[in-house]
Amino acid sequence: MPSLYIYLNEEFRWKFTLFDKEVLIGRDHRNHVVLPQPNISRQHAVIRKTGNEFVIKDESGKGLQVNDKSVSHATLKHGDLIDIKAFRLVFKFDERNHGYDSVKGTAPCEQNVDDATLPISLPDDQTQPLFERRSIWVTAGSDKGLSCPIQGEVIRVGRSPRNHLVLKDRSVSSFHLTITPKKNGVEIEDAGSANGTYVEGHRVLHATVPMGSEIRIGKTSLTLSSSMEEQDKKDGLLGENLERIDDFVLIEKRVIERSLNAHRGDRKAIAKVMGISLSSLNDKIRRHGITK
């Protein structure tokens, strides 16, 4: 994916992925990449995609510094350095990777319901394999109840229809954040949003967080969900594209009950497999009224 790695005073701040054919850069909040300093123009520069080339053009009348040379425009190559006052933007793009063009065909979550499960090891005497299913749920906001399976390499979240999880919340940016599955959780990256990304109340630009975490973007709350199910059930009960939080709560309860039976009540093992803390698992057990 073509991206800008953005530094302020030589300290890395965030990564912005160039999904759009035109990306605006400046201090005004309506830009795609917002550089909030008074000595930067409201719209300072623009990057346009033409074919497989990305061209940056000065919009400020003050010129740009690309690889320490003052230019009015330049065709960007992998590793180029763009200096805008105290900010340094590093352009990264492997031309051999055609992932950018494939973004055009991205389907929103309602249509993207392929297998999103991961195999989980079991005790020696358990013959039926369990699978972990990961999802992101909208738990508050105008899109409450919407969900998206966490599968593939990167899940994009924002208002643009080219995201995997498409939100209506006007306080959410067109491309707000990306979610990348990891072994023990997910990697969260703010995509240069105007209102920021918050995990458990703390603003983050880039972080690896466990399943069960709550993410706040604009007026929308997202929850990372992880559950386990038997192989012969994963294309049924948990393989459906669930539409209501009530359904999810019921399924989560059943999964925890079956996991307690499969692991003979070993809560530490279950929490480890689900990628959540033991205290989070205990809270879920109490909330669901499970007595085992």
Image (cartoon, helix red, strand yellow):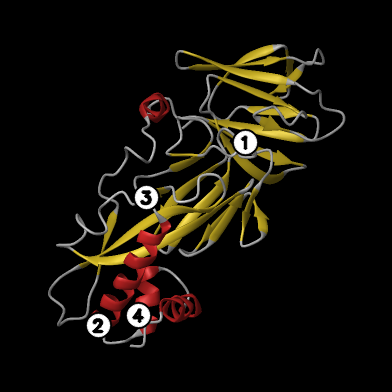
Of badges 3 and 2, nearer the viewer stands 3
Q: Amino acid at mark 1?
A: Arg
Q: Which mark is residue 243?
A: 3
Mark 4, residues whose alpha carbon is within 10 Å: few (<14), some, or many (≥20)? some
Of badges 2 and 1, nearer the viewer stands 1
In this picture, residue 254 sits left or right of residue 143: left
Tag 4–tag 3 contact (CB < 8 Å): no
Tag 1–tag 3 contact (CB < 8 Å): no
Q: Position of residue 284 (x, y in %)?
A: 44, 75
Of badges 1 and 3, nearer the viewer stands 3
Q: Earlier in the sequence, mark 4 or mark 2?
A: 2
Question: Disc 1 to disc 4, how far (Cα)?
Answer: 41 Å
| Residue at left offset 66%, top offset 32% | 89
Q: Earlier in the sequence, mark 2 or mark 1?
A: 1
Question: Disc 2 to disc 1, how far (Cα)?
Answer: 44 Å
Q: Amino acid at mark 3?
A: Glu
